[in-house]
Image (cartoon, coloured by chain):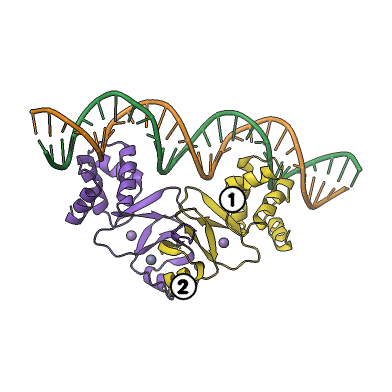
Chain colours: A yellow, B purple, C green, D orange
Amino acid sequence: MADSIIDSLKAGGKKLTKPRQAILAILESNALPVTAAEVHARLKKAHVHMDLATVYRNLTMLQELGLVDPVGLREGQMRYEVRHGREHHHHIQCRGCGRIVDLMLCPLKKLTQLVETQTKFAVEGHSLEFFGWCPQCR
Amino acid sequence: MADSIIDSLKAGGKKLTKPRQAILAILESNALPVTAAEVHARLKKAHVHMDLATVYRNLTMLQELGLVDPVGLREGQMRYEVRHGREHHHHIQCRGCGRIVDLMLCPLKKLTQLVETQTKFAVEGHSLEFFGWCPQCR
DNA sequence: CATCGTGTTGCAAGTGATTTGCATTTAACA
DNA sequence: TGTTAAATGCAAATCACTTGCAACACGATG
Ligand SMILES: [Mn+2]
Ligand SMILES: [Mn+2]
Ligand SMILES: [Zn+2]
Ligand SMILES: [Zn+2]
């Protein structure tokens, strides 16, 4: 468990509970973004009983602290991945099997071709959305 | 009602029903992406009675035919916008008021700066995801 | 180490968006 | 106009996610 994570929790007035540690362990052991249900399932497989609501509450809280990033792939559910020690990046998902691959790029140039070369995927489309504050809300 | 749309429907073995025409009219009269609930509400305001399920079924079908594009802004609901006669583009949404603005760009270079200059928004983050077919599913 | 205050959790119930089953229309065309 | 597949309304069902609340557990303090 990284110190930076512990520090962030402390700074946010959060406790390092047993269930929370278990969730973080799952997240840190996973390179790819996972859903709340997946985290819950892996916990069960590791014989750690925990309510799904607790998983959701923690993922939300960790996101608010900036410790995990949300990944929306239009699957009807959100995914999350730990930020700690990893570069900002994007993903590509196969429409057939749902497989997700990290794209360790972002400057977004020669986009599609580069993505195809790098992943061997056949790019069919992409989703790009920005978020921010408009003049009225600034 | 554009001929290209009628042709696509026919090609897909779809009927041009009264409710369907009403939905398409709403979509075509809207520059920005709308939710199923919004379409439903605008129909009601125009004194067109229709079940929400019908709206959903049509939006899904129109998307499958490639007549509308889905727009996911992590609002907990999907948005849709007609494709007909419009360039491929992206969006920016204000985290404060939810206002959505079309970004008539895509080559994605000098990304954030260009977006900020063009919209006067303060970009806080963005979501970029690709979709395609992996080697195993090709 | 015992105590206290606040954050946390489990459990059950609640939401909100989207989907589905089915009997009843309706569009398309012969 | 008759036939048939597609479409619709309505009600119920899913699904992902959230929330209320009482019991519980960190972790700071003495
Ligand atoms: Mn990733
Ligand atoms: Mn648009
Ligand atoms: Zn990026
Ligand atoms: Zn694009």
The chain carrying label 1 is A
Q: Which mark is residue B116?
A: none
Left or right of A19 in this view: B6: left
Residue at 69% from the left image edge and 40% from the top image edge: A49
Q: Position of residue A6 (x, y in %)?
A: 72, 58
- Earlier-in-chain disc, 2 versus 1: 1
Specify whether disc 2 shares its chain with disc 1: yes
Q: Secondary structure at mark 1?
A: helix
The residue wearing badge 2 is A114
Q: Is residue A13 visible?
A: no
Tell me the quarter of the image containing the N terminus of chain A.
bottom right
Q: Position of residue B29 (x, y in %)?
A: 24, 53
Q: Marks 2 and 1: CB-CB under 8 Å?
A: no
Residue at 20% from the left image edge and 41% from the top image edge: B17
From what the image shows, is residue D25 above or below residue A121?
above
Q: Quadrant of residue B108?
A: bottom left
How many discs mark residues in the rendered view?
2
From what the image shows, is residue C14 above or below residue A54?
above
- Can you tell me which quadrant of the image ligand 4 is in? bottom left
Instruction: Mark 1 and ligand 1: say if the CB distance to the nearest ligand atom is below 8 Å.
Output: no
Q: Residues within 10 Å of mark 1 (few under 14, many from 20)?
A: some
- Three-letter residue code for mark 2: Leu
Q: Position of residue C8 (x, y in %)?
A: 69, 45
- Three-letter residue code for mark 1: Thr
Q: Nearer the viewer, residue A89 or B10?
A: B10
